[in-house]
Amino acid sequence: MSSDSSRRIQVPEELKEVLLQFSISFLVEQPPDVIDYAVEYFTKLQSERPSVSHTDQSTDDQLSVNSQDADAEPPVMASSRRKSVFAEAYDPEADDDDDGATAVFPKTDEQRARLVESVKNVLLFRSLEKEQMNQVLDAMFERKVQPGDFIIRQGDDGDNFYVIESGVYKVYINDKHINTYNHTGLFGELALLYNMPRAATVQAETNGLLWAMDRQTFRRILLKSAFRKRKMYEELLNSVPMLKALQNYERMNLADALVSKSYDNGERIIKQGDAADGMYFIEEGTVSVRMDQDDAEVEISQLGKGQYFGELALVTHRPRAASVYATGGVVKLAFLDVKAFERLLGPCMDIMKRNIDDYESQLVKIFGSKNNITDTR
């Protein structure tokens, strides 16, 4: 085999991540024109990017040596006629069928444990709540394969998404081998997001086992989850005065970046002296901010729904100088990690810096001096 025929196409991880987020954003918002929306989306993304950009993992269908894809539009086909990737519309707001149409495939404890292990690194599942993740696990089914079996064929309609538990699989585009999966990986994600013919063929080289899910089930879980999360967090963020400095589009991006966390009454959320990993917005409940003073903790303030904490340690790059505890029952928080904070909250930075003086003034009232006063949050 010549070097040309064995050459593998590698799609950068950053490209996969960007395209996945764009696809989900488009399908949730459903703007009237994909080109206009893409121009606005990527122009905004460029203006918000930090000096050095990093992404965690890949997205959708992947064609690289280390990835998991057979649906992504390969670069070598760029000159061919493209098919519409948004041919099948799905409106998460209009879909009021929450659970009735979700398939359930019974599994033994052993099967479910194997499935959990197989899907634990799937990027698309990261933002799902526990209940939604259980729906995903319920809806996936086993497919055993033998050498020579075709899992998907280039040009066919997209049907299922596949996660590899075991086996070796080869990926072909126009009968040219471009990638091999060895007992790990995933492919076919794009078929779950929108109606698109397969852009590659995947064939089993050995006996193996796959976990599969149909497109409609996953789209309903994934897109409806993203839609509900955005609506819920948009309401929360609209109530935060500091965020009035953000444009509506920026607040939507912020909503998409938030991660839900819950804490029981009395549980510590932030520990004094720890490095800052992000900031928090309060969805429900109250928290107590406490600072060590004379071998005891002194309460600095209490915060409730719509308020936030943890941001000043990110602004000043200091360790946490106070602890924060959940009070009055279960507290639900929306967490924004430090990377997303730096990327999304630039327009609010001046406001947060001005707030430093306000917090120091509060501490002076409590401790009577500015000596040794640092960021309390």
Image: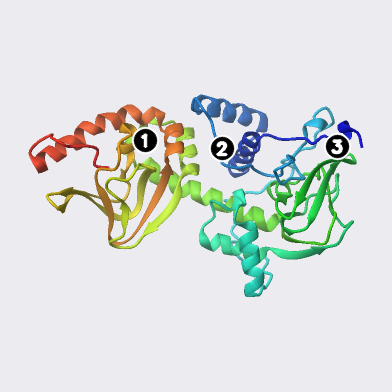
* Residue 209 appears in the picture as rendered: yes
Determine the residue positioned at 64% across, 43% down.
59
Tell me which numbered mark, 1 or 2, is placed earlier along the sequence.
Answer: 2
In this rendering, the label closer to the viewer, 3 or 2: 3
Q: Quadrant of residue 100?
A: bottom right
Residue 54 left/right relative to 12: left
Image color mode: rainbow
Tell me which numbered mark, 1 or 3, is placed earlier along the sequence.
Answer: 3
Q: Quadrant of the C terminus?
A: top left
Three-letter code, disc 2: Thr
Q: Quadrant of residue 23?
A: top right
Three-letter code, disc 1: Leu
Disc number at residue 243?
A: 1
**Secondary structure of the residue carrying numbered label 2:** loop
**Secondary structure of the residue carrying numbered label 3:** helix
* Residue 101 appears in the picture as rendered: no
Residue 310 left/right relative to 169: left
Name the one closer to the observer, 112 or 335: 112
